[in-house]
Image: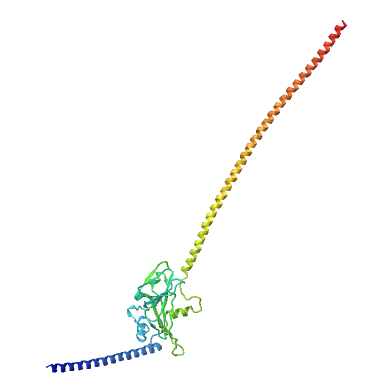
Amino acid sequence: MVENRCSNEAQNNEKNDCDNNTNSENSKETNGNLNENSASKEEEYQKNREQDPFIDITPSLLNSEDVIRYVKATDMISNFDESMMKEATYTVRIGKYCYYWEDNKTERKKRDLEKDGPFKLKKDSIVFVELEPTFKVPNYIALRFNLKIEHVYKGLLLGTGPIVDPGFEGKLFIPLHNLTSNDYKFHYRDELIYMEFTKLSRHSKNEPIKFNKNPDRDFTNYIEKALKGTSSDKVVNSIPDDIKKFEEMYEKIQKRKRFDIVAGVVLFLTFMAVIVSLYSYVHSVNARFDNSIEKIYMLEKNVEKTQEENKELREKLNKMEHKNQELEHMIDINKLNSKDSIESENKD
């Protein structure tokens, strides 16, 4: 029985090994088929991106039905979601990353929104936001996009109708400008822009157009190309710096104003002191002048009184001289009478 059991276990092991080998071969065959199908599908997409598979669709702004047909035929938008289609536009979400500079003195920062959470679009700032899909634009279609209305009414700016050229492949990064006094938060996969699709008119030569494609370019490539030939390696909003300069200028003006006020007060007080001193001096001069006038008036009165007294004295003196003359005359007369009397007596 032991031998039979061992024999059965050996047979079962051989069978399991055989089944495993069969499953492994089937899996490899399935993966191989999937890879072949994937490669074949990508070849078909590429062919349809180069040559229009729907020549019956008129060159114009495409409606939702035509956009969906082209997406299915060309894979021009990765992870396409039909529920995000409107009649003529497709809503595109925010991708994983955003890039920004806090000021002219700091290095560029990269934030993973899926891992690190939402980013804050601060007032008077610019943030470059990655769009979620990877685009593979056919050679005969151009894309145009703009902010959703809700973001427009927040006061945010994107630019006026940026165009994605036919043949573009890769990720798109768009600058969000916040010129308001508010801060706004944006999360990974928030709805950000509306995108429209325009089919170009047929080229006159009816030849396939060759495009210089670079699907591997990233945000650094865009920035380096944009800033080539400039003196800066940063893209920041100049308003905060201008505000800072204005505040510094305002502070200087305020300091100068305070200095001017103090100087004005000192000058005013000095002027008032001079006025008070001058007033005191004039008042003193006037008082002395009034005193002098009064003294002069008293002197004049005294002179007049003295003159009157002198006049009276002269009159008395004249009277006394007259009396004196009269006395002298009387004395002379008496002398004459006495002499005559004596002579008369002598004769007798």
Colour basis:
rainbow
Could you tell me how many numbered marks the image carries?
0
Rendered-image quadrant of the C terminus: top right
Q: Which residue is drawn at 62% across and 40% down?
A: 286
Q: Residue at x 54, y 54 (%)?
A: 264
Residue 209: image quadrant is bottom left
Q: In this view, does 17 lie above or below 302?
A: below
Rendered-image quadrant of the N terminus: bottom left
Q: Which residue is at the front of the view, 33 or 101?
A: 101
Relative placement, left or right, of 21 versus 339 is left
Residue 206 place in picture, x, y as percent: 44, 90
Q: As drawn, which residue projects farthest toward the right?
A: 347
Q: Which residue is drawn at 73% across and 23% down?
A: 315
Residue 195 place in picture, x, y as percent: 39, 78
Residue 147 place in picture, x, y as percent: 40, 74
Q: Which residue is at the front of the view, 242 or 211?
A: 242
Q: In this view, does 12 lie above or below 250?
A: below
Q: As drawn, which residue projects farthest toward the front?
A: 2
Q: Residue at x 51, y 57 (%)?
A: 258
Q: Is residue 188 visible?
A: no
Q: Is residue 308 visible?
A: yes
